[in-house]
Image: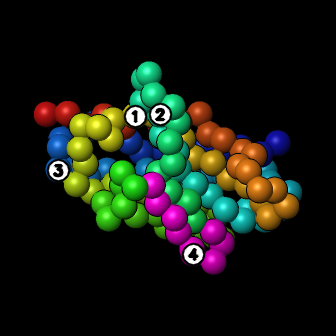
């Protein structure tokens, strides 16, 4: 059974920073791509960003230039550094992962709350 566990998050003031981590375990095949998505109440889930084993990244328009994704392949861990936070960044952030044999994310974490408020 593959487990995806997020950590970090919490409360930050507008303009502040937070970081999240995501660890994948129990996978039989190497994890090719990891990603972060977020969902605020009443909204659909939206892309924050993704990163491949080779370090190629892709970001959602709303976070481009403010958020940075990185990963440690040996630890099967992805990180999300969030800077210049805005109230509209408030959401539950979910980590996702997939191996190379699939086109969509197969494994999802339960999510961690990020709240940006003064």
Q: Which residues are magenta?
A: 52-60
Residue ID for mark 2:
39
Q: Mark 4, residues whose alpha carbon is within 10 Å: few (<14), some, or many (≥20)?
A: some
The residue lying furthest to the front in this view is: 61
Nearer to the camera, 80 or 58: 58
Q: Is residue 76 above or below residue 115?
A: below
Find disc 3 in the rendering and name its residue: 15
> Between disc 2 and disc 3, whose residue precedes?
3
- Marks 2 and 1, the one that precedes in the sequence: 2
Label 1: few (<14), some or many (≥20) within 10 Å? many
The local crowd at label 3, few if under 14, some if 14 to 19, many if 20 or more residues have their Cα within 10 Å, is some
**Res 105 visible:** yes
Q: Which residue is mark 1?
A: 91
Tell which circle, 1 or 4, labels the residue nearer the N-terminal end: 4
Q: Quadrant of residue 11?
A: top left
**Tag 1 and tag 4, C-beta contact below 8 Å:** no
Tell me the distance, in whole angstroms, between the alpha carbons under discs 2 and 1.
5 Å
Mark 1 or mark 3: name the one nearer the start of the chain. Answer: 3
Query: Residue tagged by mark 4?
Result: 55
Tag 2: Cα neighbours inside 10 Å, few (<14), some, or many (≥20)?
Answer: some
Q: Secondary structure at mark 4?
A: loop
Sequence-wise first label, 4 or 3: 3
Looking at the image, which residue is at 67% across and 62% down? 33
Q: 4 or 86, which is in the foreground?
A: 86
Secondary structure of the residue carrying numbered label 2 = strand
Q: Are marks 2 and 1 in contact (CB under 8 Å)?
A: yes
The x and y percentages for residue 77 are 59, 60
Give the CA separation, mark 4 to mark 3.
Answer: 27 Å
Residue at screen point 18% across, 41% down: 13
Q: Which mark is residue 117?
A: none
């Amino acid at each position: 059974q593959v487990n995806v566990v997020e950590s970090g998050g919490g409360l930050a003031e507008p303009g502040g920073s937070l970081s999240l981590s995501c660890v994948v375990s129990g996978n039989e095949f190497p994890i090719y791509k990891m990603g972060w998505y977020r969902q605020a109440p009443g909204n659909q889930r939206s892309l924050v960003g993704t990163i491949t084993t080779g370090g190629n990244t892709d970001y959602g328009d709303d976070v481009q230039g403010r958020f940075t994704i990185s990963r440690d392949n040996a630890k099967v861990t992805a990180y999300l550094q969030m800077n210049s936070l805005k109230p509209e960044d408030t959401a539950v952030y979910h980590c996702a992962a997939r191996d190379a044999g699939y086109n969509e994310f197969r494994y999802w974490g339960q999510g961690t709350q990020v709240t940006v408020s003064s």
